[in-house]
Structures are given as C-alpha cells and as structure tokens.
Amino acid sequence: MNESARLAALRRYEILDTQAEATFDELTRLAAGILDVPISLVSLVDETRVWVKSGFGLETGTSLDRTTAYCAHTVAQDEMLIVPDLRADERFRDYPLNGPEGGVRFYAGQQLTANGGHNIGTLCVMDTVPRHLSEKQKEALRVLGRQVMSQIELRKSLRELTVMQRKALALESILQRYTSRSIWHRADLSASQGMVTLSDQTQQYACLFMDAVGFTPYAESNSPDLVIAALNDYFDPVVASLHAQGGDIDKFVGDQIFAIFESSAAAIRAAISAKNVIDSVSARRQNLQQPAFAFRMGLNFGSVVRGNIGNAMRSDNTLIGDMVNVAARLQAVCEPGGILAAENMEGAAIGIADCVRRVQLRLRGRKTPVRAVYLAPK
C-alpha cells in the first residue's frame, strides 16, 4: 500500500472533521438495521487516527488512535475484513474497544475505495457478541459501502461544482465590468448556443471619442496612483452619464473613451451630458486647487463592422471602419472643451444642441476634406 498516495487521495475529499450529514447517518443506520448490529460507522483513516464521519451507536466526530483501530487493518487490504471474535484474534485481543464487559466482540469492515484504487476509510459494523455474517449480509455490506463511497464522491463533486459556480459568477462579473455591454450580450448569446467565437457583423452606429487635453504631461510628472485617481475622478461620472444615454463603452485607451450609440441623437445627448459633467468636475477640482482638464470630443455616424482582431489565443472584438477612423480624427483636431460632429449628424442635433460653427477639415490620412460642425449645449 502506498500510504502517501492513499493519504493524498483522502485529503482530496476534504471530508475530515466536517459536520454530521444526514445522508451518511442514514446509511450507517441502514447498515445497522440490515445486519442487526448495535454499532455501524463510516470512518476515515488518517495518518495517526481513525475519524468517525457518521456513527450509529458511537458518537459522530469521535477520533480513535489508528494503532488500536480495527479499520486501520481494513484499509490495508482489498477484501472485506471480518473478525468473528475480536478477543480470540491475537491481532485485536488487547484493543481498548473490546473491553472486559460489554465491549466490542465482532467486527466487519468494508473498504471505501476512492477513484484510483486507494482505500480511504471503511463502512464497518460491530457487535457486542461474537457472530458470523451470511453471504447475503456480506453482499449487503459491500453494496452499502459502495453507496457510502458514492456519496463521498458526490459530496466532492458538489463542492467542486460550488467552487466552479462561484468562480463562474466572479468571472461573469469581471467580464461584465471589463468588456463592453454589446460584447457581453453577444458573448452570452453565443455561449448559450454552444459557440465559442463572436461572428463579424456590419451595423449602423454613432461613435463618440473623447480625450483629456494635456493629460500626458500630467501623467509624466505625477505618480501612477495620482494619475489614476485624477482620471477616475472624471471617468466615474462621465461613464455613468454615457450609460444613462444608452451608450456602450467599447474601450478605454489611456485617457481616451470610445463609446458607441444606436442613434446620432443619443450620441449627441451623451456628448452634451458628458460635457456638463466634465465642466462640473473641473470646477470642483479647481476650487480644491487640483489639476483640471478639458476634453475633446469627436462624433460620427455610419456603417461599421464589429469584428475580431487578433488570433486564436488573444482577440479583441471591436468596431472597424472609415466611420470610426473619422470620429477618432475629429476628436484629435477638436478644440479643447469642444464637441465636433460629422456633418451627417447635424440634423439629429435639432432640439438637443446648437450648431455653433461649421468647419471643413483635411484629416490625416484622408484625400478629401471632411465637413463637421461644432455643437454646444442649448
């Protein structure tokens, strides 16, 4: 018997010193009833002790010295151990449970064999008088022993499942927090259909890019914790305002936010709302003599592809297309504190924002000029 491997198998079940459980108590009571004995135990054999998980006729949780416990002999062999008269067997004659009067005289133990073939404990029955078991009783003890081991295996599987469920819930929370809403919903739908990838899709979206002006020099001259705190001082309420307008944060890139909306009007409302939030945060920070930042915003609407970029090991599911590029470049050339939207969004701004100035721009990488309009809160 490989004792170290046997003990390792026992430890994997994490059952030692656990509370009483009705399932095991029912099996020990059933074993005592079928075999007509006063004592029945589910015992686990540890390194130095035999610990009673369930006891009928002996208190559950009892620990016995392994050197004077019958079950220690049982786990050391493959066949059921039956001792008709313990006092007549020289191996057990002096064991304390025998006792001079009213002690144990008969013992029969069935091994609890784990996956891998290691005996981790026993289902045993004892009587206060010498006796024998019939073949039917022996078979009943074998069957009940297998049932006990099945319950131990089930207990382990349920514990592992609970851990997996807890981990899955934690991962779900992480994914919901660190991925965009649209990706999360698509991933959830794909997983429910047994798919492990997100297919490419062409859709109409409004894109909003916003970027803090002068944040790079601030980041270069301040500690990382101050940089993150300053950025989140703005981003916490800004992101809430974007979500309130139905926006979905596709990604954060340093001090830049890339958000998407299902309509031009929603994107414009979000930009106005975000600007109001930014102005409020900046005023508060200035009153506290903390650095304040203006943000540039660029908006565009049109057809894009939501596609997978990367490889099988690591991918990003993001929006790709000329419309996205134009929105990003409008943000880059926008005046600090301004909202610059592509001309195709001007109609959607009616009743939401004022069009304060129209411009024609030559954007980097584009051959033809782009017409755009500066928007301001009404």
Image: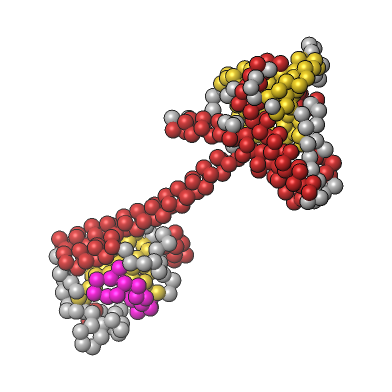
Q: Position of residue 330 (x, y in %)?
A: 76, 23
Residue 26 lies in quadrant: bottom left
Is residue 366 at least partly visible in the picture? no
Residue located 68% across and 30% down the image = 272
Q: Where 149 falls versus 56 (above or below)?
A: above
Q: Position of residue 66 (x, y in %)?
A: 38, 76
Does 117 appear above or below 74? above
- Residue at 39% in and 66% down: 18
Looking at this view, name the residue that lies furthest to the top: 368
Residue 68 belongs to the span the image colors magenta: yes
Magenta-highlighted residues: 54-71
The reply, left or right, for residue 313 in relation to residue 6 is right
- Is 235 within the magenta? no
* Farthest-out residue, bottom: 100
Quick one: 83 or 61, which is closer to the camera?
61
Residue pictured at 47% horizontal, 50% vertical: 166
